[in-house]
Amino acid sequence: MLQRILKTTSVLVAIFVALPACTTIAAAPDSSGYTSHPEAQAFIKDMAARHDFSKAELTSIFSAAQRREDILKLMSRPAEKRLAWYEYRKIFLTQSRIDGGVAFWNQHAEILDKAERELGVDAQVIVAIIGVETRYGNNTGSHRVLDALATLAFDYPPRSKFFRGELENYLLLAREENINLLSTKGSYAGAMGYGQFIPSSYRQYAVDFDQDGKRDLWNSPKDIIGSVANYMHKHGWALGAPVVIRASVSGDAYNAVLDKGLKAHTAMKQLQQAGITPSTPLPDAALAALVTLENKDGPGYWLALNNFYVITRYNRSPLYAMAVYQLSEEIRQARQQSLQVRHD
């Protein structure tokens, strides 16, 4: 949901910002927060001009926003960049997360069946994404979203433009979905809900799957599951299609394929000519990318198909995509075994 995905919070006490008939905003703390920051001042002026927000109310909101040093530190050390695959894998491929996935699937089987049927996304992948993101809703984030986005928008130059866009989307989202700007919590990057949608993804891909007039990614299992499925559907997920296949390599020509990125780009026939052999045969015309992940005993190689690339639209790390895929397989197998035992 990072990446884009990027990810949370409890909803729904009206506080509000710049509606034509706006509710009263709680008094700001003594600190000036971000109101004295030149870039925040320009942002407030722009939001008032372009989106019909009240400048006074935005000033009140940003006086409550706090710069968070811990968020800046976390942004500089994401797990996807500091851990090898065999270390990263251990975080997510645990028995408790597998068992939690089986329990979540069993509890919401009817909703997952509907999402799979209507949106064409495998239930096991929907469950695994929610499991990787928030342990099935048990950890949706402890950082106030307003603080996270303000800190990154105004005090994190490497990605300030991106996070200013997310801050803009958060204000609009709060107005649209009646989200409490001053209490909503999420990840250190401002991602929200069970599926950890950043504000732009929330606005673009979240769906009202329970048809109650709002998109609630904290309290509505139907909206949560439907929204994750819709995100994957919109990015091109193919129901039942393979995700990734182990491969072996020989020679040196395969290195050029590694440099071409994660999107499936090269026909299987050409990959084989470059010394890449899949563990399971694929048609000559099938497109794939080559991914390498670091195991304890050295690099492992995988052919990443389109569905693997789709997972990376949720989080651009190949480690993340592989964790989701492998967890989904473990959950599926564990659930099948439990259902078989129950049937026997």
Image: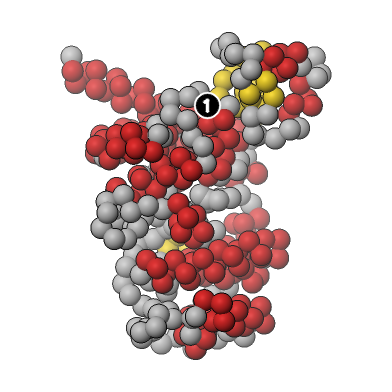
Of residues 199 and 35, which is closer to you in this image? Answer: 199
- Helix, strand or loop under label 1: loop
Expressed as whole percent of the image width and height from the top left, the position of residue 14 reads 33, 75
Relative to 122, residue 316 above or below: below
Relative to 67, residue 231 above or below: above
- The quarter of the image holding the C terminus is top left
Q: Residue at x 49, y 60 (%)?
A: 199
Q: Residue at x 57, y 81 (%)?
A: 49
Locate residue 167: give its quadrant.
bottom right
Location of mark 1 (residue): 243
What coloring was used for the rendering? secondary structure
- Residue 276 in sight in this render: no
Expressed as whole percent of the image width and height from the top left, the position of residue 34 reads 58, 80
Locate residue 69: give its quadrant.
bottom right
Expressed as whole percent of the image width and height from the top left, the position of residue 244 reads 55, 24
Could you classify mark 1 by the number of other residues whose Cα lies within 10 Å: few (under 14), some (14-19), or many (20 or more)?
many
Q: Name the outermost residue toward the right.
A: 252
Of residues 296 and 41, which is closer to you in this image? Answer: 41
**113 with respect to 262 (left or right):** left
Of residues 148 and 265, which is closer to you in this image? Answer: 265
- Residue 199 in sight in this render: yes
Relative to 337, residue 49 above or below: below
The amino acid at mark 1 is Val
Relative to 180, residue 261 above or below: above
Q: Residue at x 56, y 43 (%)?
A: 313
Expressed as whole percent of the image width and height from the top left, the position of residue 315 reads 56, 44
Q: How many marks?
A: 1
